[in-house]
Amino acid sequence: MKASRLLEQLEKMGIQTITGVPDSTLKQFCDGVQTYQGNLQHYVTANEGAAVGLAIGVYLATARPACVYMQNSGIGNAVNPLASLANRDVYGVPMLFIVGWRGEPGVKDEPQHVFQGKITCGLFDTLSVPYRVIDQNTSDEEMDEILAEAENTLKRGDQFAVIVKKGTFEKAEPFAWENGNSMLREDVLGHILKEVSRDTVIVSTTGKISRELYEQSGKIYGDHDNIFMTVGGMGHASMIALGIAKNKADQKIVCIDGDGAALMHMGALPFIASQAPENFYHIVINNQAHESVGAMPTGCQATDFSKLAQAAGYRSAEKLETMEQVDRIGQWIAERKGPVFWEIPVSLDSRADLGRPKESARENKEHFMEFIR
């Protein structure tokens, strides 16, 4: 199926706005959205719940439903505004969901997607949202029938979901852009690991940051026992790190976050600052993109995270734009009381042969807990 054809069909249905959070299963669709020559307005939001809120606003202003796309892990973020605002028992706001199905039962996937994959269809059943599943064998005619059903559902003021299996969309011309930054994320992470004390506790966010830390730590230390890799739950690594910091006051806790993850649950910044953990150090690696799921821009490329952290109340906040500055992080952690925040701009580049952790998520947790004990 061509993403461009689906987007044309959405316009014919009267949809003028498409919004959401990128997903690797939907990469070809997301590339198609970015390069589409039609009249759809496109917004990448900080999280999926925000996309539902935007869709509600669009409908209130135009009486036209919007299309909201996401990975199935984002359903959790969307449940509150969907159930307490958009549902027919409240305001009755129609919208079309396009959802990438990670962790589909019977298909090998990463551990954070397995349970989410099992419950994906059941969640839409619980939410009273009718849905259809499409894959690479879905014909154009079948898709037209699904969209006709969706259109009738939207006209009744309800929501409809299209659940997309891996490999459904044809490869489109990839959307490519540059952010102008020169430092490589993996090099930055390697330098940080070399500079911080070996007994430093590290909590890393989901995506390629954790994968690169895993490989770099293996090369430098021979293990990664001091790193809790938050392989799912995008945006929650900083609060996990805070929970550790508040209960391990004698240890230095470093959260290595991504810009997309930090945006997803931005309320963590003022809360961390208000708790004033003196052993907490927050690093946001900023490439202005959701790079781990296809490198679509976050939609907030101009955001200055160091200024946000300063305004939130961190004891100090800086932007580090050279490797010489990065190499001082270990010294600063030893000298400064937290909470301290560093933003590090990096390029969009990553290795094509980047590996994945060999241990299970549960094994990682057990090794990590033994380390901090």
Image (cartoon, rainbow, N blue to C red):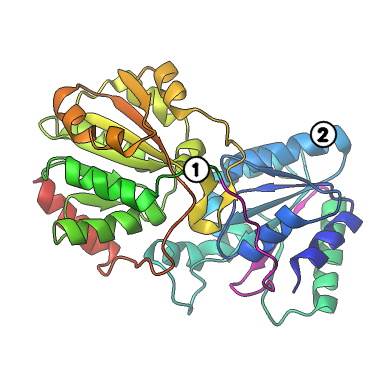
* Circle count: 2
Front residue of 94/62: it is 62
- Magenta segment's dominant SS is loop
Quadrant of the image containing the N terminus = bottom right
Q: Which residue is mark 2?
A: 60
Give me the disc on residue 53: none
Residue type highlighted by circle 1:
Gly
Q: Tell me the SS state at disc 1.
A: helix
Q: Is residue 160 magenta?
A: yes
Q: Is residue 29 magenta?
A: no
Front residue of 22/101: it is 22
Can residue 54 be spotted in the picture?
Answer: yes
Residue 336 higher or lower than 166, as above or below: above
Residue drawn 86% across the image and 62% down it: 9
Q: Tell me the SS state at disc 2.
A: helix
Question: In the shown orientation, is residue 146 left or right of residue 121?
Answer: right
Residue drawn 19% across the image and 35% down it: 330
Front residue of 247/189: it is 189
Magenta segment boundaries in residue numbering: 157-178
Residue drawn 82% across the image and 67% down it: 5
Q: Which residue is mark 1?
A: 260
Residue 52 drawn at (x, y percent): 67, 42
